[in-house]
Image (spheres, rainbow, N blue to C red):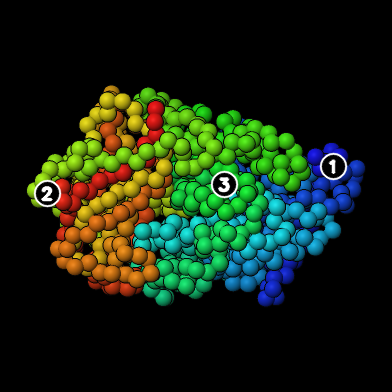
C-alpha cells in the first residue's frame, strides 16, 4: 500500500490559477500534507472536487451522526490531506473566484478535462486523480469521465451525474422540473456580480421567488433574475427545448450516450429514493456495469438529497440503521477514504461499500407505523439489503389492474365499457407534497409525507385535506394486504387515456397506505414514487404528436425507482391525475410551444378501465 509518514499538518496553496483551453482562468486551492515540518514533496494521488458552490464554503451535506454541524470544504479537504492525499478544490467557470460566464452544466466536460490534464502535469501528482462530490459536483465528474481523461483513476459520484438530463434532473416525461427556477434564484444571490454590487443584491433579494414560481412561464426581462441575464437565459433555454434535440446532446447533459467511450475506472455511485437523481444513478450503474470492468458499486439509501446521515426523509423515519453512519461505514469520510485507499493506494477491499458487494440498497418499510415521540414522524422502518447486481435477482413484474370502482388488484377487468374521468385545470394544479426532488425551497420539500394538504401547503387552496379527495385525482387501491409485499425497482403504469385537448399531462403516484391507528385516525398515505408523461411525447421525445379528441391512447409511464415493504394490513395505492406542481410545470393543454406564456385550457381527461383497455400498475416484486 502506498503510504507516507504520519501527517502533522496541512499546507494550503490558495488562489492557484488553472488556464482552460479558451484562455479563461479557473481558481483553485491545493491542500498538501506536511510531514517532518515540511510540505511533502514527493508525488501523491490527488483528490479533486470541482464546485459551483464556493470552494471554501460551508457544505450542508458534510455532516455525520456524531457531528451534525455542517463542515466547510476546507475542513473536508484538510481531512483528506491528512490521510495522505493532495486535494484540489476548484470553483467552476463564472463562480466565486473563477473567470468566465456561468452557464449551467454545459462547460463542465471541457473544463474538467483541462483541469485533470493540468493536475497530471504537476510535480506533486503521481499520475492518479480521484474525484468526488455531491449533486452538481457529481455532474461535473461524469461530464469529464465521458471524455476518458487519462489522469482519472476513480470516482465517488454522490447523488448526481446525469444519465440523460432530459429524462431526469431538468426535464422528466417531457415536463420541466421547476427546481431549476428555485436553484437559479438562490445561486443568483451569490453570483460574482451580486457580491460586487449591493444595489443589485438588494434588488434580487426583494423578489418573491414563491410568487414568481406561480407566475411561470417567465419571459426575457420579466423574471426574478432578469438583472442577471445569464441565469435567466439558461432557465428559459432549458424550458423551451421541449423536444430531445441538439441542446440535450451537449456533452455534460447525458452520460448514457457515452458509456462505451467513458473512462473505465472504479466508481462508487451513491443516491437515495427521495433524490431527483435516483433514476440517473441506477441507469448509470447499469450502463457502466454493461460497458466497463470498473468495478462499479452502488448504494441507494432512503434519504433526501445528500442527507445520508439522517434516518428520515420528510415526515417519515426509517429507523437508526437507515443512516450511512454505522451501517455502511463509521461515517461519510471513512466511506470515501476506503474507496480512494483501495483504488489509489492499493489498500485491501475493506468492508461495506468498498468490499466485493457491488450493491447495497435500503428497503423501506416494516416499522411500527406509530408516531415517534421524539420528533413526531411516522415510524416506517426499513433494512439494508446486499446484492450482487441491479436489478435484483428474483424480481418479478406483477400487474395490478385498475378498476372503475377504485379497486387495484390482479384480476382483469370485466368486458364492457368502463372508465373514469376528471377535469384538469392548469390554474388549479395538484400540489406537490414531497417526492424525489431537491433545491425546491421555499416552494417544495423532498421526502415522504402524508398526502394531505394543510393551510401552509404551497399551492393548496381551501378546502384542505387528502389529495385523494380532490375531484381531479383518481384513486385506485388494493384491499388490506394479507401478507407483506416487497418491491424494489422501477414501477410503471400502463394507462389507456383519452382527452378533449391536443396535449395534456398524465401523472401517477405510488402510495403506501398505512391503516388507521390511534396516532393516525385517518391512516397515513405515504408517497413512495412519482411519474409523469406529457402526452405529445407518447411516440418519442424528438417529434411531438398531438392527441385527437376522444381517441384512446395506451401510455406507459415509468415511476421513479423505489424499494419498499408494504406490510400486511397496508394498502397499495396509485393516484392518477394530470399535475404535480411545483415539482413540474403545469401543462396548459393547448399543444403550444413549451416554456412560453400563453392561454390555458381546462382538459377533460379520461382513463379507460375495461377488458379492451386494461389499465394497470406493474410493480417489481421480490420473493419473500
Dot label at residue 418? 2
Image quadrant where one finds the N terminus? top right
Residue in the picture at 69% in, 36% down: 349
Along the line of sight, the residue nearer the viewer: 8 or 419: 419
Left or right relative to 480: residue 20: right
Q: Position of residue 144 (x, y in %)?
A: 63, 61
Q: Quadrant of residue 226?
A: bottom left
Dot label at residue 419? none
**How far apart are labels 1 and 3 at the CA level?**
28 Å
- How crowded is the residue under tag 2: few (<14 C-alpha within 10 Å), some, or many (20+)? some
**How far apart are labels 3 and 2 at the CA level?**
45 Å
**How far apart are labels 2 and 1 at the CA level?**
73 Å
Q: For the residues labelled 3 and 2, say whether their Cβ atoms are less than 8 Å apart.
A: no
Q: Position of residue 95 (x, y in %)?
A: 61, 64
Which residue position is annotated with label 3?
269
Q: Nearer the viewer, mark 2 or mark 1?
A: 2
Q: Nearer the viewer, mark 3 or mark 2?
A: 2
Left or right relative to 546: residue 417: left
Dot label at residue 4? 1
Where 72 falls versus 162 (above or below)? above
Residue at the far left in the pictured view: 416
Q: Secondary structure at mark 2?
A: loop
Left or right relative to 77: residue 42: right
Q: Secondary structure at mark 1?
A: loop
Left or right relative to 338: residue 524: left
Residue in the picture at 61% in, 59% down: 262
The mark nearer the N terminus, 1 or 3, is 1
Q: Secondary structure at mark 3?
A: strand
The mark nearer the N terminus, 3 or 2, is 3
Q: Position of residue 413 (x, y in %)?
A: 16, 43
Amino acid at each position: 500500500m502506498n503510504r507516507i509518514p504520519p501527517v502533522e499538518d496541512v499546507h494550503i496553496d490558495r488562489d492557484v490559477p488553472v488556464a482552460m483551453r479558451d484562455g479563461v482562468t479557473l481558481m483553485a486551492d491545493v491542500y498538501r500534507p506536511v510531514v517532518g515540518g515540511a510540505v511533502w514533496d514527493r508525488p501523491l494521488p490527488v483528490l479533486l472536487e470541482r464546485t459551483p458552490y464556493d470552494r471554501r464554503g460551508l457544505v450542508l451535506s458534510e455532516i455525520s451522526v456524531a457531528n451534525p454541524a455542517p463542515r466547510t470544504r476546507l475542513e473536508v479537504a484538510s481531512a483528506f490531506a491528512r490521510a495522505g492525499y493532495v486535494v484540489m478544490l476548484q470553483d467552476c467557470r463564472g463562480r466565486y473566484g473563477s473567470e468566465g460566464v456561468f452557464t449551467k452544466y454545459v462547460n463542465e466536460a471541457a473544463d474538467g478535462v483541462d483541469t485533470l490534464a493540468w493536475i497530471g502535469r504537476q510535480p506533486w501528482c503521481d499520475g492518479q486523480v480521484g474525484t468526488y462530490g455531491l449533486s452538481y459536483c457529481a455532474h461535473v465528474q461524469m461530464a469529464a469521465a465521458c471524455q476518458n481523461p487519462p489522469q482519472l483513476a476513480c470516482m465517488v459520484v454522490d447523488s448526481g451525474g446525469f444519465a440523460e438530463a432530459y429524462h431526469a434532473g431538468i426535464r422528466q416525461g417531457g415536463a420541466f422540473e421547476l427546481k431549476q427556477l428555485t436553484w437559479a434564484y438562490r445561486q443568483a444571490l451569490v453570483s460574482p456580480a451580486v457580491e460586487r454590487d449591493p444595489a443589485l443584491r438588494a434588488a434580487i433579494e426583494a423578489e418573491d421567488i414563491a410568487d414568481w414560481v406561480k407566475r411561470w412561464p417567465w419571459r426575457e426581462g420579466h423574471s426574478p433574475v432578469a438583472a442577471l441575464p445569464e441565469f435567466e437565459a439558461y432557465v428559459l433555454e432549458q424550458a423551451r427545448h421541449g423536444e430531445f434535440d441538439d441542446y440535450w446532446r451537449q456533452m455534460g447533459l447525458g452520460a448514457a450516450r457515452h458509456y462505451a467511450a467513458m473512462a473505465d475506472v472504479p466508481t462508487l455511485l451513491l443516491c437515495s429514493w427521495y433524490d431527483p437523481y435516483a433514476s440517473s444513478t441506477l441507469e448509470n450503474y447499469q450502463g457502466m456495469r454493461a460497458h466497463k470492468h470498473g468495478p462499479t458499486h452502488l448504494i441507494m439509501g432512503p434519504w433526501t438529497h445528500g442527507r445520508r446521515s439522517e434516518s428520515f426523509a420528510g415526515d417519515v423515519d426509517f429507523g437508526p440503521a437507515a443512516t450511512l453512519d454505522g451501517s455502511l461505514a463509521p461515517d461519510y469520510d471513512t466511506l470515501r477514504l476506503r474507496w480512494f485507499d483501495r483504488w489509489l493506494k492499493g489498500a485491501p477491499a475493506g468492508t461495506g461499500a468498498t468490499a466485493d458487494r457491488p450493491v447495497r440498497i435500503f428497503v423501506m418499510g416494516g416499522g411500527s407505523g406509530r408516531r415517534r415521540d421524539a420528533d413526531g414522524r411516522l415510524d416506517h422502518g426499513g433494512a439494508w439489503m446486499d446484492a450482487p447486481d441491479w436489478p435484483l435477482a428474483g424480481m418479478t413484474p406483477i400487474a395490478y389492474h385498475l378498476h372503475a370502482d377504485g379497486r387495484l388488484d390482479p384480476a382483469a377487468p370485466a368486458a364492457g365499457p368502463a372508465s373514469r374521468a376528471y377535469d384538469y385545470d392548469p390554474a388549479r394544479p395538484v400540489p406537490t407534497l414531497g417526492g424525489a426532488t431537491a433545491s425546491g425551497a421555499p416552494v417544495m420539500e423532498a421526502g415522504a409525507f402524508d398526502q394531505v394538504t394543510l393551510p401552509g401547503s404551497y399551492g393548496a387552496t381551501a378546502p384542505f385535506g387528502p389529495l385523494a379527495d380532490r375531484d381531479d385525482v383518481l384513486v385506485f387501491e388494493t384491499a388490506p394486504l394479507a401478507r407483506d409485499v416487497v418491491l424494489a425497482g422501477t414501477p410503471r403504469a400502463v394507462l389507456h387515456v383519452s382527452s378533449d385537448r391536443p396535449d395534456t399531462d398524465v401523472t401517477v403516484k405510488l402510495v403506501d397506505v398505512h391503516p388507521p391507528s390511534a396516532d393516525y385516525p385517518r391512516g397515513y398515505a405515504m408517497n413512495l414514487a412519482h411519474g409523469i408523461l406529457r402526452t405529445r411525447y407518447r411516440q418519442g421525445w424528438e417529434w411531438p404528436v398531438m392527441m385527437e379528441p376522444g381517441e384512446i391512447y395506451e401510455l406507459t409511464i415509468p415511476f421513479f425507482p423505489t424499494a419498499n415493504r408494504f406490510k400486511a394490513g397496508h394498502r397499495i395505492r396509485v393516484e392518477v391525475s394530470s399535475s404535480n406542481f411545483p415539482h413540474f410545470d403545469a401543462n396548459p393543454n393547448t399543444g403550444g410551444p413549451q416554456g412560453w406564456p400563453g392561454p390555458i385550457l381546462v382538459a377533460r381527461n379520461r382513463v379507460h378501465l375495461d377488458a379492451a383497455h386494461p389499465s394497470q400498475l406493474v410493480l417489481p416484486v421480490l420473493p419473500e
